[in-house]
Image (cartoon, rainbow, N blue to C red):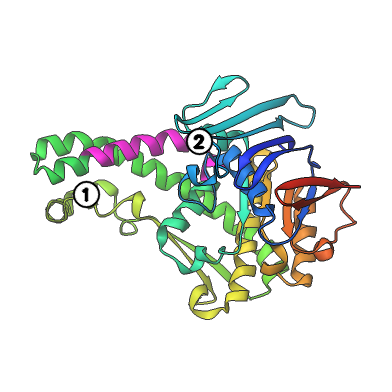
Amino acid sequence: MPITRLKITDVRNLQAVEIRPSPSLNVIWGANASGKTSVLEAIHVLGRGRSFRAGKLEHLVRHGQERLQVFGTVMEGPEGPEIPIGVERGKDGFRARIAGRDVRTAAELSERLPLMVVSPDSQALLEEGPTIRRQFLDWGVFHVEPRFWDVWVRYDRALRQRNALLRARGRNAAIDAWDGELIRCATQIDHFRSAYIEEYCAVLPQFSDALAALGDVVVDYQRGWPAEEPYEDMLKRNRTRDRELQHTHLGPHRADLRVRVGKTLARDLLSRGQQKVLVVALRMAQVAVLRNRTGRGCTVLLDDLAAELDADHREKLLLLLRDLGVQAFVTAVERNAVTASWWDTQKMFHVEHGRLTEMV
């Protein structure tokens, strides 16, 4: 589902940019602070409703301006049609539209435009806490399991209600009323995640071997409560502790992934350079599962690729991306940092002082 047209207005230092990207490889090069990463951020806003760098979307609005706008058209299937998507952030809030229809949640944007990001802080997937790994896991489940999002929203609502009752020292009967929904949703979420990880782990060696060559890479799924114990039993057994803590301390909201090389956690064994290569392999395996399960492509954003990977690993990654049939946007400081003449179609853009020019 490639982006066929992209128009960016007042995102960071980008005043007014409009391009027609290649459906395969797009290289954006220019000096530091010229606006390369801002282009990727704008695409991320279009597909996720937020930046992959800034905490608040209003921080992306160009200095002195009141709002930012990003518009794109996305090819729906090999033969079309082209679907228009637009997002806007101003003082009056955030708005998004798909094919002329108002969008209520960022999930609708994500479903229409699957995005995968590799940025200079990618190794955070291994080094930081479980939140980022749950997001990684749920990105994959969301894009291959149509029922997942609705079930997750229901679980989150029930969890909030239960936690509110725990804080208010609510009666057991009131807590019981929400436990039924929590149990139903938790069981489904665990089933979706378990099935996804099983398929993901079957695909992963293809990418970890090709890119990282680290040996046996293993991803263990930890569901968020003791293995082999039904969620219902765990909730009952832990209610007294939950009351003391004033929140539900176990469940799908506490799930995690343990990434090991052999028997050792990757973050404890690998250098930062090795971690970056491994994270790229982990993310590319997700792109492959998406393609295998749905037949859909993915738009991959690779920020400052030359700083992340050496020339040999860059070439291997670009070959894998080509074979996966993705649309890729790659930023680099030097024009020759990314050479991929073996791609069927590619475009190169130079960015300078917030202006983007296609190189012929």
From the top left corner, tell me how far across and down residue 261 is, in percent: 55, 74
Q: Is residue 140 above or below residue 32?
A: above
User: Disc 2 residue type?
Assistant: Ala
User: Disc 1 residue type?
Assistant: Leu
Query: Was residue 344 drawn as part of the magenta stretch in this picture?
Result: no
Query: Was residue 143 drawn as part of the magenta stretch in this picture?
Result: yes
- The local crowd at label 2, few if under 14, some if 14 to 19, many if 20 or more residues have their Cα within 10 Å, is some
From the top left corner, tell me how far across and down residue 154 is, in percent: 35, 34
Instruction: Report how many numbered discs are placed on residues in the image.
Output: 2
Viewer-nearest residue: 40 or 11: 11
Residue under label 2, please give it.
Answer: 107
Span highlighted in magenta in the image: 141-161
Q: Is residue 182 above or below residue 209?
A: above
Image quarter of residue 203: bottom right
Residue under label 1, please give it.
Answer: 235
Q: Main secondary structure of the magenta part?
A: helix
Residue 321 in view:
yes
Q: Is residue 286 shown left or right of residue 160?
A: right
Q: Is residue 218 shown left or right of residue 30?
A: left
Image quarter of residue 60: top right
Viewer-nearest residue: 290 or 99: 99
Front: mark 2 or 1:
2
From the top left corner, tell me how far across and down residue 293 is, in percent: 64, 42
Viewer-nearest residue: 234 or 116: 116
